[in-house]
Image: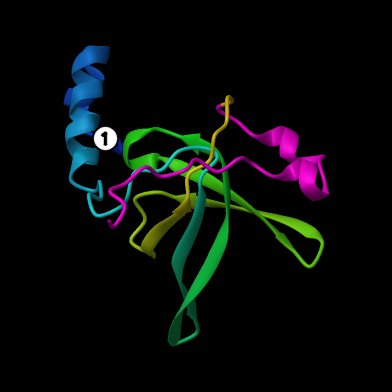
Amino acid sequence: MHTYRPLLPLELFNMTTEARGTLIEKLESQYLRTDLPQFRVGDTVAVHYRIVEGDKTRVQLFKGLVIKRHRAGARSTFTVRKNSFGVGVERTFVLHSPRIEKIEVEARGIVRRARLFYLRELTGKKARVRAKLERGNSAQ
């Protein structure tokens, strides 16, 4: 006869919700990456993503506008939208994935929304996001 074996230790079932949440945060914290730059919705980013094809690996560049961020610890994701040959292409990346080689922030955008889904219906110049001008020390 098959005996029931829980997937999680029995101690987890007897814990309070707060204690279980802190335990999950401790487990996830070891998988968080610290080498990625800070970016927001509206920024133009270039994501260097490692792709495995058979026994070969290559790095593919996906450059576009961040239209969504989902912040959930190690499960955080972000969605990048680009226009490829007149067709809008969106791709969702797991932020702390080991397959992301690097993320380059190419331009900071000025937006007043957390989700830029309205850009899906816009075309041409209307689909642009204003770029924030960087104030730095100019060479004198």
- Residue 42 is covered by the magenta coloring: no
Residue 113 image offset from top left, x and y in percent? 59, 25
- Residue at horizontal 25 percent and vertical 50 percent from the top: 33
The foreground one among 87 and 22 is: 87
Q: How crowded is mark 1: few (under 14 residues within 10 Å), some or many (20 or more)?
A: few
SS majority, magenta: loop
**Position of residue 112 in the picture relative to residue 72 (left or right):** right
Looking at the image, what colour scheme do you see? rainbow
**Position of residue 61 in the picture relative to residue 76 (left or right):** right
Residue 125 image offset from top left, x and y in percent? 78, 47
Disc 1 element: loop
Quarter holding residue 105: bottom left
Report the residue marked by disc 1.
8
Residue 118 image offset from top left, x and y in percent? 74, 33
Give the residue at the far front of this rendering.
140
The residue type indicated by label 1 comes to: Leu
Residues shaded magenta: 114-140
**Residue 47 can be seen, yes or no:** yes
